Image (cartoon, grey):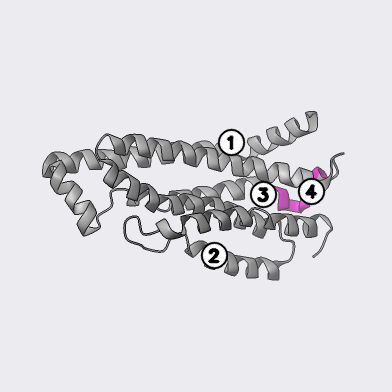
Amino acid sequence: MMIMKSIIYKEWIKIKGTFLAFLVLGLIALTIVFLRVRHDILFVDAANYWYSFLFRGSPYYMLLKYLPAVAGLGIAIAQYFPETVDKRIKLTFHLPVEENEILIMMHAFGAATIISMFLFFFLIFIAGSSLFFPSDIIIPSLISIVPWFLGGVAIYFMVSLILLEPIWLYRGLFAIIGGGFITFFYINASIGGYKPIIVSLLLLTALSSIVVLFTGYRFRKGEM
């Protein structure tokens, strides 16, 4: 238990600054989104604004599109890049805990931190949207932004994989494959258009969480 607490504390120290920076950035972005909505509704009136959203495809939430992606990238780098410098992560693997268990704890903590932040943003988005829109607008909006947040989590998993990979050739291959994989989360679609594949994207994101175990194994065995 003490070792687990020490690992979690170490991981928190590494990502704390990045996490807080993106937390503030996300709150600023959400504030701007709803200030714009309020401004536009005051000048256009709610009915016309809703019509523009539903039938002209003018979503009010586009400012949020790449925020989860950048957050996932930033936290993965903050957490794993220091471990790759001079292979410092090998020191962690020498703790009296099974190696896979240590890596799973590190990875689970990073993922839980990102998911918690994204859920916080998601709840604020729902609360803010409910002030201006009926459910007929809020539900398709939620369906549209869910893939962006899943994409942010998937980016965290893929960047972790790339950073822990000890062979540069494989890093390049993983980057190409991961880049193609991530595009599925950011394809332009009509409002609510992602509904048929939300579950599939969720499953793919969950599956991508385990790939780091393979490259982590190769890293700690010293493959070059």
What mark, if any, has residue 181 been given in the picture? 2
Residue 24 position within the rendered picture, expressed as x and y whole percent measured from the top left: 44, 36
Residue tagged by mark 4?
100
Q: Residues within 10 Å of mark 1 (few under 14, many from 20)?
A: some
Q: Where is residue 154 in the image (x, y as percent from the top left)?
A: 56, 54
- Residue 109 lies, with reference to residue 48, above or below; the image says above
Q: What secondary structure is marked by label 2? A: helix
Q: Can residue 193 be seen in this view?
A: yes
Q: Which residue is drawn at 68% across and 58% down?
A: 211
| Dot placed on the residue nearer the N-terminal end, 1 or 2 | 1
Residue 87 belongs to the span the image colors magenta: yes
Residue indicated by mark 3: 80
> In which quadrant will I find the N terminus?
top right
Q: Name the residue under label 1.
A: 16
Find numbered disc 1 in the image and state the secondary structure of the residue it sits on. Answer: helix
Q: Disc 4 or disc 1, which is closer to the eye?
A: 4
Q: Type of residue at label 1?
A: Lys
Segment colored magenta: 81-92
For marks 4 and 1, give the CA distance. Answer: 24 Å
